[in-house]
Image (cartoon, rainbow, N blue to C red):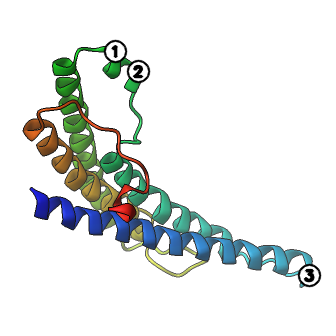
Amino acid sequence: MNAFSRALDWLAALTVAVAGAALVGLLAMMGWLVFGRYVLNDTPTWIERAATLAILAIAMPVAAVGVRERFHLSVLGVREALPRPAQRWVALGCDTLMGLFGLGMAVWSWELVGMVAAFRIPLLGISQGWTYVPMAVGGALMVLFAIEQVLKDILSKEAPEQRGVAAAFLE
C-alpha cells in the first residue's frame, strides 16, 4: 500500500505541475490576446478556442487530484457529526461513488474522443477529440485516486483524514 501511495503522490504532483504549466500557457495566451486586440488592433481568433482547451486540461485532471486530497464536492459536516465507525462507512461510500463516477467519465469521454476524432476544430486545425481527452484522463486519474482512498478506508482503523492540497509536495 505504501508503494502504491508513493506512486500516486508522484502522479498527483506531476498532474498539478502539468496543470500549473498549462495555467502559465493560458496566461500567456490571454496576454497575447489583449496585446493583439488593443495594441496591434488585430485579434488572434485562435486563442479563445485554445484557451478553452487549456482550461479543460487544467480543470479535469486537477479535479481528480481533488479526489485524492479529499477536497472534492462532499459535505464533511454531515460525516463529521456521525460516530467514528459511521464516518468510515460514509467515507468508503463516498470514495466508491467517486471512483464509479470517474470510471463513467473516463469510459464515456473516451467514446466521445473516438466519435469526434475525424472532425477538426476550425481555428486550430486539430481533432475535436482533444476537447474530450482531458475528461478521459481526469476520469482515469479519479479512478486511481479513489481506489487508493477506498483501500485506505478499508485498512485504516481511524476516521478518514482530510488531506491538505499541498500534501503531496510536503511529504
Q: Could you tell me which residue is drawn at 33 percent across and 46 percent down?
A: 67
Name above or below for residue 34 compared with residue 1.
below
Quadrant in which the C terminus appears: bottom left
Name the residue beneath numbered marker 3: 39
Estimate the spatial distance between the alpha carbons at disc 1 and disc 3, rounded to whole Å: 57 Å
Of label 1 and label 3, which has the lower sequence position?
Answer: 3
Tag 1 and tag 2, C-beta contact below 8 Å: yes
> Label 2 crowding class (10 Å Cα cut-off): few <14, some 14-19, many 20+?
few
Q: Which quadrant would residue 114 be assigned to in this image?
A: bottom left
Name above or below for residue 77 compared with residue 169.
above
Name above or below for residue 148 compared with residue 159.
below
Tag 2: amino acid: Gly
Answer with left or right where residue 123 lies relative to residue 151. right
Name the residue beneath numbered marker 2: 77
Estimate the spatial distance between the alpha carbons at disc 1 and disc 2, rounded to whole Å: 6 Å
Q: Nearer the viewer, residue 114 or 77?
A: 77
Name the residue beneath numbered marker 1: 81
Tag 1: amino acid: Ala
Q: Secondary structure at mark 3?
A: loop
Answer with left or right where residue 154 lies relative to residue 82. left
Q: Position of residue 16 (x, y in %)?
A: 43, 65
Q: Nearer the viewer, residue 96 or 69?
A: 69
Q: Residue furthest bottom?
A: 40
Q: Nearer the viewer, residue 134 or 66?
A: 66
Q: Position of residue 103 (x, y in %)?
A: 22, 49
Count the marks.
Answer: 3
Q: Position of residue 20 (x, y in %)?
A: 51, 69
Q: Secondary structure at mark 1?
A: helix
Res 96 seen here: yes
Estimate the spatial distance between the alpha carbons at disc 3 and disc 2, rounded to whole Å: 51 Å
> Label 3 crowding class (10 Å Cα cut-off): few <14, some 14-19, many 20+?
few
